[in-house]
Image (cartoon, coloured by chain):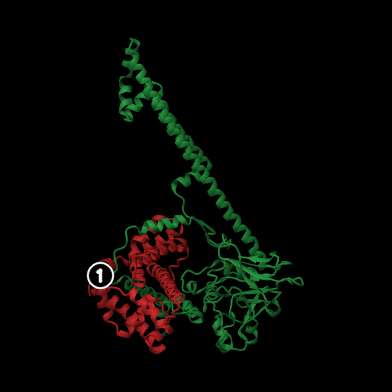
Amino acid sequence: MNSEWQDLAVDYVLGHLSGEEKHRFVLKLDRDPALRDLVAGLEQTLGQVAEAGQAPPLPPDLWAGIEQKLAAEPLLFQSADKNSKKMVVAAPPGLWQRVLRHPAWAIAACGLLVWNVYDRAAGGLIGPEAGQSFSGNGMTDASGRAGGAGDSRVAGAAGGDARLLLTRLEQLQAEKEALQAVVASKERNLDEALGQLDGLDAHNAKIAADYMRLADRFFPFYESKPGLGRFTVIELRDAESASDPNMRFGIPEKAFEMLTKGSPLTREQLQLAQTESLVPGKNNAVQGPSPGPGIVTAAGFTSDNALTLSSSANTGRVNLSGGNSASLVDQTGGDNSSGALPSAWIVHNDAEEIGVINMVEFPDLAPGTTAILEMRGSLSEEFESFGVIPFDKNSDGRILYSTQGKNMTPLEVRIVDQNGNIIVQGP
Amino acid sequence: MSAGFVPCSDIMESVEEHEYEAEGALRAVATGDRRALNWLYREYGRTVWALAWRVLGNAPDAEEVVQDTFVKIWQQAERYDPGRSRPLGWIVVIGRNLAIDRLRQRKREAATELLAEQSLPEEDQILEKNQETTSMPTTEEWNELWSQLAAGEREALRLSFFEGCTHEEISQRLSRPLGTIKSEIRRGLLKLRGILKREVSL
């Protein structure tokens, strides 16, 4: 292996690679077992370096803290992609939840519990066999003695020992009341557990409904549907996700399939797509955002010949070309010939909190309509406005926006008019 | 060199088997097996803790990072690709990224506090402050390991790995050319790799 690849391997494991350099390295990594071994070895070294030196002992309650955090996030919405292996992921339920999740088991569990409690209650109240059972279980010393000697005492009562009989009766009455209280308590617990089960079911149903709602929105934007623009966004990546080895696969993959009429995305193409960078414009000037929050038109891109986006009505593909600058073509990392990878999902990585949305065939707006970009970081949040889209200058349909100061990674994007009516919306 | 941070030979005999087990544990975690996550925690929690401690220099922050690391492993285990990295490397990258994120957050907070006092900080001041809080007592083996690197290699690698600085930032902080910094980092890590590999094969 030559020293260039060795050097790149070091840069890779330390997170210093990005853009085209990283694409090239990852492709080589997949093909070169020796390079994979080197990377694994360097990672191992970093692990050893990390562990070297003096650190206090691992705090004993850390694992408990992890479990608490996992319990605090019982449901995660991981992907809007229908093909994702884990669309809606719930934290693994405990035994109690697993049992109660199925109505038949829940009923059986209730029945067993109630039967058990009543059986014990009955044992204290009637019959010599039940009395022996209590005694045998050693439940209470008092009832045990009563159970064992009761027959002779009752016989004695028949002979006139009414006081002993009354005492025994009072004991039994007290036990009855205590057991009735236990039954009531257990019933309350069961009601509570069943109530929680209902709540969990409702929550799951809501998550499933949310998923379907998003899926319904997601797909029309990738098909030529009258009245809807083809909304070719997608993944926002910041510096953290760029250095994260766990790429998000779902949306770009699906976007590619839709845009290429179902052609599967190869592993190589997927890697390219996931590591695309926002390309600086001419004279090394990153195009936007201009100072202040809101949306900035990307018209400057075309005038600087940085990137051009075009679409074909026949093939449904979006093509990316690099203008007049060969270096820019290289930096995009993709094949820029006709029918190449669409740039649709390309979002930045060289400056945090900046994203690009490419829109093709956006519907004409009625005169006087103002289009406003809104996003939110999770389904539980309200949409937040990112400003008015300057369509008059946005001829190529590309929107460059900034999330600076918003402290949010968009999960869901929509464009509304000034009255709040939704024009397009998608995950 | 002492065996404090170098796996013993008898341990190394089972490294491959151990990695295989770790991959299996990650696969099990992906299916929702909490016991497998606990296994990974027992195997690698100490490493992540030591790393987070070294980067952040205080227990509360380091604890948060360890917890967040294993929560992230729980959430993302299905995305682990054994063809791309080994379990230890994958986990260390997650832990390191989280630790560096927290370190940067702390820097921002420090900068905000200083701004609030109407005293604009020099970048060096912030970095110095951070360095003060992250300087660790070092052990003999740590010193011995690092003493085998040249001073420049040592410092550049430390800033890169433990502070997540870019090449440009390191070049600026150490007032050395960018190319030199890149070479020092690359040489340093490969040298460490060689040293540890030799120790392991003894």
Residue A152 lies, in percent from the top left, at 31, 15
Residue A287 lies, in percent from the top left, at 59, 82
Which one is in front, A59 or A169? A169
Identify the residue at image location x=48%, y=77%.
A27
Q: Which tint is chain A?
A: green
Report crowding for label 1: few under 14, some 14 to 19, many 20 or more residues within 10 A (C-alpha): some
Identify the residue at image location x=76%, y=70%.
A366
Looking at the rendered image, the quarter that the C terminus of chain A falls into is bottom right
Task: Indicate left or right for A363 with A146 as reference.
Answer: right
Identify the residue at image location x=35%, y=27%.
A134
Q: Which tint is chain B?
A: red
Q: Which residue in the protein does label 1 denote?
A: B4
Question: Outermost residue, front direction?
Answer: B118
Residue B160 lies, in percent from the top left, at 39, 79
Residue B92 quadrant: bottom left
Tell me, yes or no, if residue A426 can be seen here. yes
Up the image or down, A367 lies above or below A98; here it is: below
Residue B168 lies, in percent from the top left, at 43, 84
Question: Outermost residue, top direction?
Answer: A159
Up the image or down, A294 lies above or below B29; here it is: below
Task: Indicate left or right for A107 with B18 as reference.
Answer: right
Looking at the rendered image, the quarter that the N terminus of chain A falls into is bottom left
Task: Indicate left or right for B152 with B121 as reference.
Answer: left
Task: Indicate left or right for A89 with A212 as reference.
Answer: left
Up the image or down, B148 lies above or below B32; here it is: below
Number of residue marks? 1
Q: What's the amino acid at mark 1?
A: Gly
Residue B65 quadrant: bottom left
Tell me, yes or no, if residue A129 can be seen here. no
Residue B193 quadrant: bottom left
